[in-house]
């Protein structure tokens, strides 16, 4: 990150008091923490087949749309989307002729690191070009895994549990507990991710100020966190909507 110059130094006017500009001694660890956070969030959300890879496709497509297909990363993004789509065929076994393949930690961590570095590249100005979109807009493109990770960790801490110990409190677990099949849960989660990404694209298109985008993202996180915090109540409500829970 340091030698390539891919560092978050300007977060934009996210609080409404002027641009948040960090000195290098703060920007470097901030970028490292951001990268580790997104890498971990993509790994944590990879709880059902096709979810992490599907979210990545949506994020890459959102970046491409936001940049009006004019970025120098265009070919790279298109090739990466094509590669992940090919992976989806095997991971979801969309045809009986293929054998199942899993992404694993290496795959989810690689795409997490790629996404955060790509967003850093697109949101930070250099000597030869300006930022292509607000740093806060990038939160929406990573919205679902980021919000899910923070919500899950806060819920575990609040209950006095190890925040890094795996459990079944992620959103996709709640939907499956309510009786939705893994495929149905995948579609629901990807629709949620697409909605969050769509909000980011729309806010960028409307040239919404960074402070407004950040405020709406915090509001979105608050609603999501409340749902996770009352996961079992939400699950019972979903059971009434969907029908009796199926045996796992």
Image: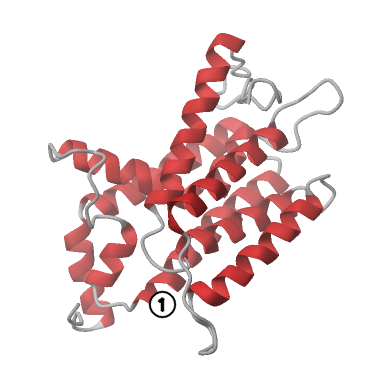
Total tally of numbered discs in the picture:
1
Q: Position of residue 26 (x, y in %)?
A: 53, 13
Location of the C terminus (image quadrant): bottom left
Q: Residue at x 22, y 67 (%)?
A: 235
Give the quarter of the image for residue 113. top right
Picture layout, residue 28 above or below residue 44: above
Judge by depth and name the residue closer to the eye, 14 or 72: 72
- Above or below 129: residue 40: below
Which residue does the numbered mark 1 point to in the structure image?
A: 183
Q: Nearer the viewer, residue 109 or 174?
A: 109
**Left or right side of 46 for 120:** right
Toward the bottom, the furthest residue is: 96
77 left or right of 46 in image: right
Q: Is residue 34 left or right of residue 241?
A: right
For the question of whether residue 15 can be seen, the reply is: no
The residue drawn where x is 45% and y is 66% is 102
Q: Nearer the viewer, residue 118 or 175?
A: 118
Q: Position of residue 94 (x, y in %)?
A: 53, 83
Q: Is residue 224 visible?
A: yes
Q: Quadrant of the N terminus?
A: top right
Q: Residue at x 35, y 51 (%)?
A: 224
Residue 81 spot, x, y in % from top left: 67, 61
User: Where residue 136 appears, x then y in whole percent?
Assistant: 58, 35
């Amino acid at each position: 990150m340091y030698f390539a110059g891919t560092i978050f130094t300007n977060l934009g006017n996210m609080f409404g008091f002027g641009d948040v500009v960090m000195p290098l001694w703060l920007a470097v660890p901030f970028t490292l923490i951001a990268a580790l956070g997104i890498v971990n969030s993509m790994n944590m959300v990879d709880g059902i087949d096709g979810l992490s890879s599907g979210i990545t496709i949506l994020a890459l497509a959102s970046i491409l749309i936001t940049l009006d297909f004019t970025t120098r990363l265009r070919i790279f993004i298109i090739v990466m989307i094509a590669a992940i789509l090919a992976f989806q065929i095997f991971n979801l076994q969309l045809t009986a002729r293929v054998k199942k393949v899993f992404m694993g930690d290496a795959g989810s961590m690689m795409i997490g690191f790629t996404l955060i570095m790509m967003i850093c590249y697109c949101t930070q100005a250099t000597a030869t070009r300006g930022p292509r979109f607000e740093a806060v807009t990038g939160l929406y493109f990573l919205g679902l895994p980021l919000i899910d990770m923070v919500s899950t960790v806060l819920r575990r801490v609040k209950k006095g549990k190890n925040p890094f110990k795996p459990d079944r409190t992620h959103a996709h677990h709640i939907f499956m507990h309510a009786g939705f099949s893994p495929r149905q849960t995948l579609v629901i989660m990807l629709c949620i991710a697409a909605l969050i990404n769509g909000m980011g694209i729309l806010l960028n298109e409307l040239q919404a100020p960074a402070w407004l985008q950040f405020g709406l993202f915090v509001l979105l996180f608050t609603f999501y966190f409340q749902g996770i915090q009352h996961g079992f109540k939400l699950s019972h409500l979903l059971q009434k909507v969907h029908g009796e829970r199926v045996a796992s």
